[in-house]
Image: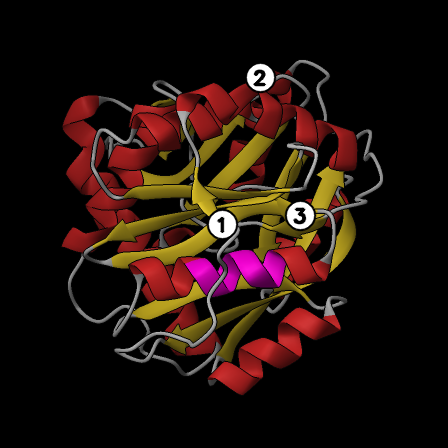
Amino acid sequence: MNVKLERLQPHQHDELAKLLHASLDAWHRTRLNVDRFGAEWEPFRLTVEVYEELDPGCCVVAMDDSGALMGSAFFHPRETHVGVGVVTVHPAAFGRGVGRALMEEIIRAADGKPLRLVSSAMNLDSFSLYTRLGFVPQIMLQSMTLNVPSSGFAGASARMRMATMADMTAIADFEFRLNGIRKEKDYRFFEENRSGCWRLALIEKADGTIAGFLAASAFPTDNLLGQGVAEDEATMLELMHGMLTQHFCGQSVAFILPSRCSTLVRQAYAWGARNRETNLLSVLGDAPPILGITLPTFLPESG
């Protein structure tokens, strides 16, 4: 099969949403025996719209000889690295080298910058692809879902406050100090909040410096916690507690926790959260040590 790589065009957005749905639905049904996404492809328009608004022109698509989409991969150029977003291949093209072609194009576009991605640890095809390309897993993660009670959780943080645009540089500096990466563009995007569906909160220490921050998306089809970074598990737990109670009462919310953070994981179970997948944060190139408690997310994907 011949594969032609180009950048996503506006007239392809619906076709790409259908591809995202077909790829993820097929994999979860055949490999995990789970009907997670249902029959409707329309909710996947959100992924395409968010990614294109955040980083216009940063989606590589693979097309066959007829011009039909066979795969896609988003990427996010940032100050210190390039983040790899969702990578999908049409079920009809599984195992035909489409994913590798897409990733090699992103590696070329990164022009020597490190690449970071969050991927399924349960998908051995993607795991094999990434490790063959040189990605090295850094931490194990677990994707969880939680039905938040209609009354929220008692004792939510009094220290947590919503961020303002004046906090953005300090938030980016905080993440760089702890984890060696910088994504100020992401946090400014959340704070601009053109859709009205982004949330960004922080906790400060007594001296006014940041102890942690946590973003969330509250779209009708996607309630997600992350991106977020904190100095310790207690601070991240306080942020999660406050965000869930203030913004997601009576709703189902998904989040990704580092498996090594036993306090966070145990509290999530105590709240009633259930695991839905295990994931890996992997890096190609320089990988600064992760000193903070990091919650990545899938919208937009972050490592």
Q: Earlier in the sequence, mark 1 or mark 2?
A: 2
Query: In the image, residue 81 lies at what x, y percent?
Result: 66, 24
Q: Residue 238: say if magenta.
A: yes
| Number of marks in the rendered image | 3
User: Residue 192 placed where, x, y %?
Assistant: 31, 25
x and y, in percent, of residue 96 in the image: 50, 48
Q: Is residue 94 magenta?
A: no
* Mark nearer the viewer, 1 or 3: 1
Residue at x-position 20% and y-position 44%: 45
Q: Amino acid at mark 3?
A: Ala
Question: Which residue is found at the position 50% from the left and 71% from the top?
Answer: 144
Question: Mark 2 = which residue?
Answer: 109
Location of the C terminus (image quadrant):
top right
Query: Magenta span covers which residues?
Result: 236-242
How far from the left and from the top, in percent, is residue 273? Answer: 48, 80
Residue on which disc 1 sits: 160
Helix, strand or loop under label 2: helix
Identify residue for label 3: 230
In front of the other: 138 or 251: 251
Badge 2 density bin: few <14, some 14–19, many ≥20, Cα 10 Å: some
* Displayed quadrant of residue 253: bottom left
- In-image side of 248 versus 288 (left or right): left
Which quadrant of the figure contains the N terminus? top left
Residue at the farthest top position: 111
Residue 242 seen from this side? yes
The residue type indicated by label 1 comes to Met
User: What secondary structure prevails in the magenta region?
Assistant: helix
Residue type at numbered disc 2: Ala
Return the residue nearer the eye: 18 or 224.
224
Give whichever of discs 2 and 3 has the lower sequence position.
2
